[in-house]
Image (spheres, coloured by chain):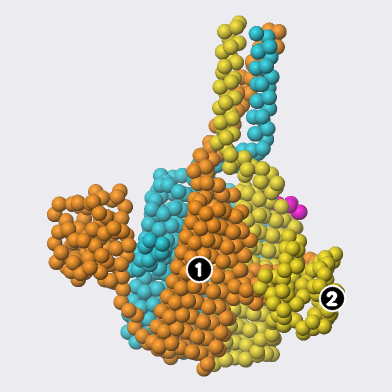
Chain colours: A yellow, B cyan, C orange
Amino acid sequence: MKLSELAMAVGGEVVGADDVEIAAVATIDAAGPEDITFIANPKYLAKLNTTRAAAIIVAPGVSATGKNLLVCANPYLAYARIVAVLHVKAPQVRGVMAGAWVAPDAVLGTDVTIYPGCYVGAGVRIGARTILYPGVVLYDDVSLGADCLLHAGAVVREACRLGDRVILQPQAVIGADGFGFAPDGARYYKIPQIGSVVVEDDVEVGAATCIDRGALGETRIGRGTKLDNLVQVGHNARVGEDNIFAGQAGIAGSTQTGAHCTFGGQVAVNGHITVGNNVTVAGKGGLTNDAADNQVLAGFPTMPIGDWRKSALIYNNLPDLRKEIRGLKKRLELLEKNIEENK
Amino acid sequence: MKLSELAMAVGGEVVGADDVEIAAVATIDAAGPEDITFIANPKYLAKLNTTRAAAIIVAPGVSATGKNLLVCANPYLAYARIVAVLHVKAPQVRGVMAGAWVAPDAVLGTDVTIYPGCYVGAGVRIGARTILYPGVVLYDDVSLGADCLLHAGAVVREACRLGDRVILQPQAVIGADGFGFAPDGARYYKIPQIGSVVVEDDVEVGAATCIDRGALGETRIGRGTKLDNLVQVGHNARVGEDNIFAGQAGIAGSTQTGAHCTFGGQVAVNGHITVGNNVTVAGKGGLTNDAADNQVLAGFPTMPIGDWRKSALIYNNLPDLRKEIRGLKKRLELLEKNIEENK
Amino acid sequence: MKLSELAMAVGGEVVGADDVEIAAVATIDAAGPEDITFIANPKYLAKLNTTRAAAIIVAPGVSATGKNLLVCANPYLAYARIVAVLHVKAPQVRGVMAGAWVAPDAVLGTDVTIYPGCYVGAGVRIGARTILYPGVVLYDDVSLGADCLLHAGAVVREACRLGDRVILQPQAVIGADGFGFAPDGARYYKIPQIGSVVVEDDVEVGAATCIDRGALGETRIGRGTKLDNLVQVGHNARVGEDNIFAGQAGIAGSTQTGAHCTFGGQVAVNGHITVGNNVTVAGKGGLTNDAADNQVLAGFPTMPIGDWRKSALIYNNLPDLRKEIRGLKKRLELLEKNIEENK
């Protein structure tokens, strides 16, 4: 594909030879004379001069003599789009393959693909062009939108609903029983979890990530939210739109998050709290209480990230701080003695 | 079902119309005129007056004019039981379905159900009424009790034994190799893990939760214990009866816990330690040493939760504490100078 | 097997009866008169006198009257090897079993075993003697070396490559999409993850552990590295040789580790950093920055483990430290007043 065609596709401007042929996208170090690469982070600008790439996607204001540049307002986004253009082919439609079990009353949209080893229960509805990779299990009455990708081994339990363009990575589990038990004297009595899960449009769920069904009512994942691998979402949580949960983060039951929240790796969010819009919790943080809009938090319990950095630095030097205190104590004792003697 | 019949079923007392018809259980906000709801937490008592529910399960001593109440000693437990009565139907017995592979010498109890895509190895024994959802894999010589539910994709490796009424959520893994390697100079030599796992009666294992087999001997999960999703249990751990492990908690190898322990989300329990009865570790805590009975711990390393709250509060204000110390230092220097000059 | 034969097999020396028959390996407490046991930790030496074992593997310098000893330089390693000799049988070769789906163009080595419910995609290559347990899914163009064991439900996505003797525990996921999204104004645009994963020889991957594919280029796990259960490896990470990751640890994208690193349970390693050789991070630690060779670190952010122990101890007594400071303050005020009055 010519560089000029890619520029058209992503809305950028060519500086240099716009008819250079581009075959692939590569990292700036690995790129060869048929590749396009990108610089999204200014600290890598020096590599502009050494890369062998046929063209480089850069932000406005960047120049490089003798290089072919594709100037885009958002180079990282342009890179992502060019990867999609050059490298992603529409998957082949294969229909219901031999070795898949599909209940007779399941309703399948046009051009669905169901690989061997899948199980599609009674009353299931699957939207157009959705693909179930091998070993996907849909319990009864599940509903999937159009253009979903369910990777191998993903499980959706009874009556859960996924919107359009939802992606489940391998082994994702939607709708397992919420963790609810009523103490019955010494033992625990299982509270039947009769709610469900609703996953809205454009959500991605990572590998082995678990979203539990509601005890009563729904657990809900808002439109456009992306959950990384091994994330836990407790029953009746309501995650807002365009949230990001990094790997191994967890959110306990009945908590609600606003739009555009970001939770770093291994973050824990307490149950039964309310998190505002645009709240970020840095990796390993533990959010125990309600959080107002527009904050960046860290630590456990969380505090504003700037404060956390200061506290963490002092923590790492607590022995010195204690020495300082003990030093003051000795000087104080000396003074006290001195004054006592001079009375 | 009439309210009076539900009262009989759960051992409560009706205040109000005992012939009102109840169709379903709902949350106090969502309940309509055919629903029963519950108030287990006194802070929601104000909602008694606004709920549209046909009846409300409450604790003794609560009253509300014009409302139908079901008074129970333990409202939360009564709610759980009523959900079971109204919403849970006995699953249909389906036998060994087409597309399931069952070894010829496997011994199946009466009324088992084995869905398509399951694999049942040689020498396996399955108790009466147990259900294997699609894609469950039982390696050779596994033994399952009666009335177990193994959800889609659950795996039980060779020779592991589950008691009666055990529930495995989707993707649970019982009996993977323990993590044991002997350093052999620069490299690691794999120690064959020839032990097994015993899961006692009434245990529930969450989605993608992993219980490793013993190196030699057993890993054991005590009767009635409930493990949430994504929990890790190391080889040769012995978890006591009626323990609770919340999501993403982990317990390392060869550790033993007493009865009625509770571990919050993302808690880590060290290997080779002994934990007493009735020990609770709050979320994100890290228990590194033996713990005596009847404690509530928090932090890492853990301390009594009251102490942790105080330390955490000071931690979050360490910069102020340091300022205070530096202030004292200046005043001390001033005094010292003052005294020196006045000698 | 005679003790003398075991001694030959593992390179040890018998003290006592070298013709005693050994049937099995057992723990020192459980061992009976046909078992061999071991003492790898000197703190258990007292049990030498009470064990009923037929023989005990010990380190040089240990003696015990009337006991049969197998003296080995590395008793733990000798134990591991004897377990392999006495307890591990070569698995039966079963070929492609009925109920497995194998693409016509897949290339299978000699003596492979593929259980029912497996899916082997187009262009896949599988080395000799490799075993796929039930429900394993290999997407198109996957390549597996010889003598691999892929346990039930393991998934390897398109074009990922595993070396020889690689073990995947149940539900391991190799090659799920890396977690990459480009902000597009308010929403996130998915960056197609077109890289792959390379798992080198002798790697073991724990149950439900996830190794994401590169965005561009590879994610790589070095020879001999062992990952425990529920571990997360982000896209384009490059884990060195002979690393150990304990349960629920995670390493974010584009980070590189040297040889012989060890990461404890629930450790988090930040993205885009470089970790040297022989770096250990104790359990629950969080490594945020580059780390030089030969360090043992702990805490979050990490510091040398000795310092962390000191800081953690002070943290647990912060209220006392504050009291000390407040006490000093009062004494200082008294002195100041005293001096002021005596001027």
Among the 4 quarters of the image, the one containing residue B137: bottom left
Left or right of residue C155, residue C341 in this image: right
Q: Residue at x 52, y 42 (%)?
A: C307
Left or right of residue C146, residue A255 in this image: right
Is A188 colored magenta in this rendering? no
Work out whether residue B12 can be spotted: no
Q: Residue at x 24, y 48 (%)?
A: C46
x, y (%) of residue B108? 36, 81
x, y (%) of residue B174? 42, 69
Badge 1: chain ID: C
Q: Which residues are magenta?
A: A291-295
Left or right of residue B156, residue B10 in this image: right
Front in this rendered view, residue A270 or B30 = A270
For disc 2, the marked residue is: A16
x, y (%) of residue A127? 68, 84
Local secondary structure at mark 2: loop
Q: Label the magenta part by its dominant secondary structure.
A: loop
Amino acid type, label 1: Gly
Is A293 colored magenta in this rendering? yes
Local secondary structure at mark 1: loop
The N terminus of chain A, quarter of image: bottom right
For disc 1, the marked residue is: C222
The C terminus of chain A, quarter of image: top right
Front in this rendered view, residue B224 or C178 = C178
Q: Nearer the viewer, mark 1 or mark 2?
A: 2
Among the 4 quarters of the image, the one containing residue B106: bottom left
Amino acid type, label 2: Gly
Crowding near the residue tagged with mark 1, few <14, some 14–19, many ≥20 C-alpha atoms within 10 Å? many
User: What distance separates the C-alpha of mark 1 from that of mark 2?
Assistant: 41 Å
Work out whether residue A133 can be spotted: yes
